[in-house]
Amino acid sequence: MLTLSLLDPLVVPRGSTSGGALRTACDIAREIERLGFVRHWIVEHHDVAFEANPAPEVFAVALAQATSRIRIGVGGVLLNHYSPYKVAEALRTLGALFPGRIDVGIGRATAGPLADRALQRLRDAEIPDDHADHVAELIGWLGNDLPESSPFHGMSIMRDEPPGLLPWILAVSEGSARRAAEMGLGLACSAFHVPEQAPHSWAAYHQAFRPSRHAAGIAAPQGFIAVRVIVGETQEEAERLAMPVRAVFHQRRKPERIMLERLPSLDEAVAIMGGMIPAEGSDWPAFIVGTPARAKAALERMAAQTGAREFMIQDFLDDPALRLRNYELLVRALA
């Protein structure tokens, strides 16, 4: 049986506020826990007007307090912007507060030229490409087992607490997947950006996996595939619901990176896209769009090709009641 998790961009519903979106997310976390979802992850975005998620490591506390079993994920930390030590302090604090329930997704991404600069302490310095070193340092801090070669060997964070966190590498490419495998970390395999690459990344991870030497690592491969899924009671409804999110990412991926001020309406999305876009029929579409039965068939096809049993879904809808209805429909179809 396939299991589901949620990747929540914390879209601010039309007519609401960022605070309202955060409180709504706590309600949704309780409901998806009841439905049997494995994880509720929150993404890190900056300078996005209609997303209330600039500090997932802070909001994770509220989500964990609102629930009792579901794993809460800071999913992910854009480590290219931060000190691994400070990130680890925040995450180990979460782990101490909610033992055995906190995930951390480790990634790298641009937040946009201005936001990237605003996140830097030295605004005019050229930032080196030292992501791999920072990931290794972060994992060492999370388990308090930095190697002797580290200049910080001997330092620790909450040394009286066990590792307690499950680190995952956010991977789009085979290279990132292999890095997760070689470090003995979980694989959060993205089928968002280049969906057809996902089965190759999944295979590369399982072929290259080695048990981790770190206390915060794992001994056997563990992974899930993240997909965008928009379901409706009918195919026509699902295709309408998918139009706003299609328009958002169509604009973001233009060379000039257009960031919309709010989630567009259906009519606005149709205008941006130049018409209605039907659901893709490929094995690995950018958006799985359709009835619960169609979505189930797509997920089962992906599972058959990879062996994945857990899928993390993202819908980007801004109507909480509609989201919960759709999650219930999808859970019922998979059951």
Image (cartoon, helix red, strand yellow):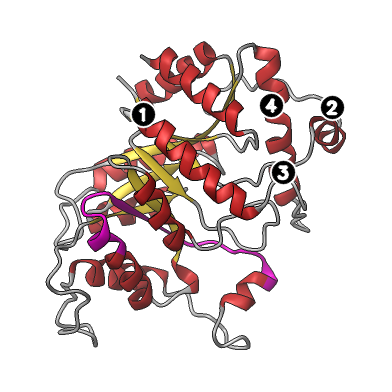
Say left or right for 295 vs 335: right
Please say if the residues under marks 3 and 4 sit with CB atoms less than 8 Å apart. no
Residue at (26, 66) in percent of width and height? 139
Counting residues from the N terminus, which is met first, the one under dot 1 or under dot 4? 1
Task: Give the quarter of the image for residue 319.
Answer: top right
Residue type at mark 4 is Leu
Residue 241 got which mark? 4
Q: Name the residue nearer the viewer: 219 or 243.
A: 243
Q: Is residue 259 above or below residue 239?
A: below
Q: Is residue 93 above or below residue 29?
A: below
Q: Position of residue 70 (x, y in %)?
A: 32, 40
User: Is residue 103 found inside the magenta-colored segment of the image?
Assistant: yes
Residue 34 got which mark? 1
Q: Name the residue nearer the viewer: 176 or 86.
A: 86
What is the CA distance from the residue labelled 3 to the residue labelled 2?
15 Å
Which residue is denoted by mark 2 in the rendering? Answer: 275
What is the CA distance from the residue labelled 1 to the residue labelled 3?
30 Å
Residue type at mark 1 is Arg
Please say if the residues under marks 2 and 4 sit with CB atoms less than 8 Å apart. no
Counting residues from the N terminus, which is met first, the one under dot 2 or under dot 4? 4
What is the CA distance from the residue labelled 2 to the residue labelled 4?
14 Å
Please say if the residues under marks 1 and 3 sit with CB atoms less than 8 Å apart. no
